[in-house]
Image: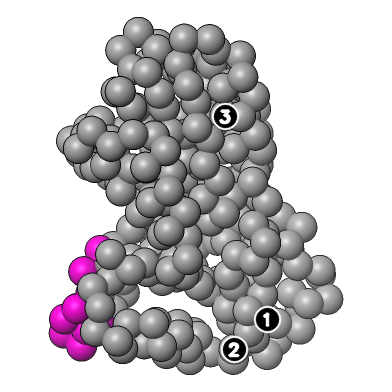
Amino acid sequence: MKTAVVTDSTAYIPKDLRDKLNIHMIPLSVIFGGETYQEEVEITAADFYEEVKHKDLPTTSQPPVGEFAELFEKLSKEYDAVISIHLSSGISGTFQGAVTAGSMVEDIQVYPFDSEISCMVQGFYVVEAAELAAAGKSPQEIVERLEEMKKSIRAYFMVDDLSHLQRGGRLSSAQALIGSLLQVKPLLHFEDKKIVPFEKIRTRKKAMKRMVDLFWEDVKSGEPYQAVIIHANREAEARQWKAELAAEYPNVEFMISYFGPVIGTHLGEGAMGFGWVKK
């Protein structure tokens, strides 16, 4: 049985890796005024962070169901099944779009998978699924492995500017004002598929240290892990952080990723995230 792997653009998997592993990607969009741009296709993360300096914060939109149906239809000519892995259904209707489109196509079995998370931590599932599909594993075996990964996947992130969360409806104006005055850097995570505060921390440095403490709790066993540092236009800081962590945790394979346009709209420039999973 030949299985295809589909994800959406918010996994922010580098194009060369997508091409190498034959991962199919459906883009979400950002809308500046009347102009719509598909992220990872028509607008890069770097372009996006430049644009928001001069324009109002954009809105975001999920892919039309028709785009999913069209892709699944096309894949049905070559594949028997498709594993479709998407950002958390608690923050976007993208996963539901894949479910709906999957019920519309006839010649291919669609297995939608809710990552319950986003960004390159979602990408961990996608890469694993693609490698297993290439090795000839059945869709059921792949989904089983993804469910197993869910038990050890963790991710935390910190926002630098609370106004984005407030404008996106994630934080009340009073909380944003108080947070800014006190320099609070809320540490956030996904719980029950939604973004919720994990802890309120006073400074950026302390928030990043707290993420490392949480990470240490999981990786101190010495078992092999993979981890990702995710940044919103703070590449130099991310590289420095990665170098420090890689020297300290030889049992962990580290990579760097980014918050692209859609997720960056909600978190704002300067956000940092840290995610990991047991290999």
What is the three-letter code of the residue carrying label 3? Ala
Label 3–label 2 contact, CB within 8 A:
no
Residue 180 is marked as: 1
| Residue 172 visible (yes or no) | yes
Q: How many marks are shown on the rendered structure?
A: 3
Q: Which corner quadrant holds the N terminus?
A: top left
Residue 98 is marked as: 3
| Horizontal side, residue 44 vs residue 133: left or right | right
Disc 3 from disc 2: Cα separation? 37 Å
What is the three-letter code of the residue carrying label 1? Ser
Q: Earlier in the sequence, mark 1 or mark 3?
A: 3
What is the three-letter code of the residue carrying label 2? Ile
Tell me which residue sits at (65%, 34%) in the image: 96
Q: Position of residue 61 (x, y in %)?
A: 63, 35
In the figure, residue 98 lies in which quadrant? top right
Q: Earlier in the sequence, mark 3 or mark 2?
A: 3
Residue 201 is marked as: 2
Label 1–label 3 contact, CB within 8 A:
no
Disc 1 from disc 3: Cα separation? 38 Å
Label 3's element? helix
Disc 1 from disc 2: Cα separation? 12 Å
| Horizontal side, residue 154 vs residue 227: left or right | right
Label 2's element? strand
Label 1's element? helix
Q: Nearer the viewer, residue 183 or 185?
A: 185
